[in-house]
Amino acid sequence: MNTIKDIMEILNNISDFSLQEKWDNSSLNIGSLNQKVENVVLSLDIDSDIVKDNKDCTLFITHHPSLMSSMKNINPDFYPNNLIKQLIKTDSAHIAMHTNFDKTHLNRYVFENILGFKIIKEKDFICYGDIDMSLDELYLHVADKLKLDFKKISPLNKAIKRVALTTGSGGSFISSIEADCFLTGDIKYHDGLMAYENGLSFIDIGHYESEIFFSEILYKELKKNDIKAIISQSKNPFKYT
């Protein structure tokens, strides 16, 4: 039976935890390195439904951390304390692989394997590729591949020759994007205004929708290392109508 320490070493070889951003918490969020692991569950997020539906001594490995800021009180009625209570009660644990995994696997996988584009340049979180589509054609392609049920794009309508992608939330990169169109999620009003003024088209590809592939990527990597895991996907907190 593996310990969490054993699996942490494997995960570090897959995607070095030292690559994470300074503000991130890619690590063992909940649990002890000496705990025994009987089950491994993969998901984008850890939530109450996933925790409730699984067995004791389960290691949850997710993309997003459960602990990102200091806690000033512990109230088990509210997130994430409710999850901490349940994991401790069932001798379970939680590891997050966030910005390190973005850099080593997730962005590249979505760009190449899901959208079918060829990377010509990669810079930290940003993948670049050359295409020949109109903005509308690109949106239809992306919406089909990522199963988007909403449409949020810039009003610019021009030929797209170079496209850039950052999964999750990449609005902070808009000022440095060197492309005709930027694909990312969580684009805020002022991000959109900057893109418009800079002549950059964008397509909001959703945070959940663009990162949902984390589990299937890690599942394949763990299988290479003889670690059995199951995928129990968390729910999208947003519903579009």
Image (spheres, rainbow, N blue to C red):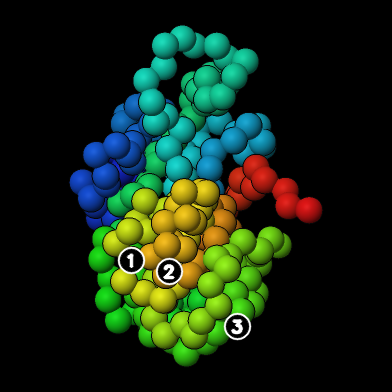
Circle 2 sits on which residue? 200
Left or right: 17, with 235 as reference point:
left
- Cβ atoms at labels 2 and 1 below 8 Å apart: yes
Q: Amino acid at mark 2?
A: Leu
Is residue 158 among the parts visible in the rendering?
Answer: yes
Q: Secondary structure at mark 3?
A: helix
Instruction: Kindly report which numbered mark, 2 or 1, lies closer to the viewer in this rendering.
Output: 2
Q: Secondary structure at mark 2?
A: loop
Residue at point 35% right, 27% down?
A: 32
- Extreme residue toward the bottom, this view: 132
Specify whether 21 is left or right of 106. Answer: left
| Crowd class of label 1 (few under 14; some 14 to 19; many from 20; radius 10 Å) | some
User: Between residues 131 and 124, which one lies in front from this camera angle?
Assistant: 131
Q: Nearer the viewer, residue 218 or 36?
A: 218
- Relative to residue 225, is residue 123 drawn left or right? left
In terms of sequence position, does the residue under pointer 2 or pointer 3 come before the other? 3
Q: Position of residue 21 (x, y in %)?
A: 26, 44
Residue shown at the point (33%, 59%) measured from the top left: 175
Give the amino acid type for the residue marked by disc 1 in the picture.
Ile
Check disc 3 and give the amino acid type.
Glu
- The disc, 1 or 3, on the residue closer to the chain's N-terminal end is 3
- Measured as percent of width and height from the top left, residue 153 is found at 58, 65
Q: Which residue is mark 1?
A: 177
Q: How many discs mark residues in the rendered view? A: 3
Identify whether 112 is placed above or below 235: below
